[in-house]
Image: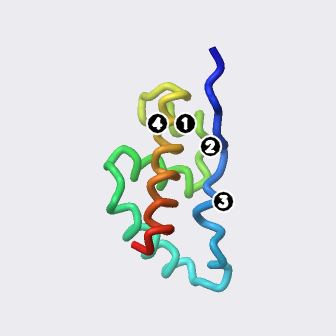
């Protein structure tokens, strides 16, 4: 039984949207605003990932399995991309 595994080692798809000239403060503010549309656990996972924690470190910090953490990151990524596509 093989499931499609998606990349969870970075959020480059979300963070690298032509925002290179954006100040860290503006980027953090925009990210926090976008995160409001996510579940609290997804918000926490994304914030930790953006702070350069590895998937394993996040899983340990939250007391979740690696696979659960990967799923949370994937759901958050999909929702953030949906919001971006919808112009929210």
Real-space CA distance between mark 3 and mark 1, rounded to the nearest whole angstrom = 15 Å
- The part of the image, by quadrant, that contains residue 21 is bottom right
Real-space CA distance between mark 4 and mark 3, rounded to the nearest whole angstrom = 22 Å
Residue depicted at x 56% and y 56%: 51
Real-space CA distance between mark 4 and mark 1, rounded to the nearest whole angstrom = 14 Å
* Quadrant assignment for the C terminus: bottom left
Q: Are marks 1 and 2 in contact (CB under 8 Å)?
A: yes
Name the residue tied to disc 3: 12
Q: Position of residue 84 (x, y in %)?
A: 49, 68
Total tally of numbered discs in the picture: 4
Q: Position of residue 19 (x, y in %)?
A: 62, 78
- Which type of secondary structure does the marked residue at label 1 adopt? helix
Q: Earlier in the sequence, mark 4 or mark 1?
A: 4
Circle 4 crowding by C-alpha within 10 Å: few under 14, some 14–19, many from 20: few
Name the residue tied to disc 1: 70
Name the residue tied to disc 4: 61
- Which type of secondary structure does the marked residue at label 4 adopt? helix
- Left/right placement of residue 41 relative to residue 53 reads left
Real-space CA distance between mark 4 and mark 2, rounded to the nearest whole angstrom = 17 Å
Mark in the foreground, 4 or 1: 1
Q: Which mark is residue 8?
A: 2
């Amino acid at each position: 039984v093989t499931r499609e595994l998606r990349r969870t080692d970075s959020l480059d798809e979300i963070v690298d949207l032509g925002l290179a000239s954006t100040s860290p403060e503006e980027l953090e503010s925009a990210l926090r605003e976008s995160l409001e549309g996510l579940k609290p656990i997804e918000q926490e996972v994304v914030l930790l990932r953006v702070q350069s924690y590895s998937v394993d470190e996040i899983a340990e910090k939250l007391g979740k399995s690696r696979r659960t953490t990967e799923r949370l990151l994937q759901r958050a990524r999909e929702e953030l991309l949906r919001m971006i596509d919808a112009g929210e």
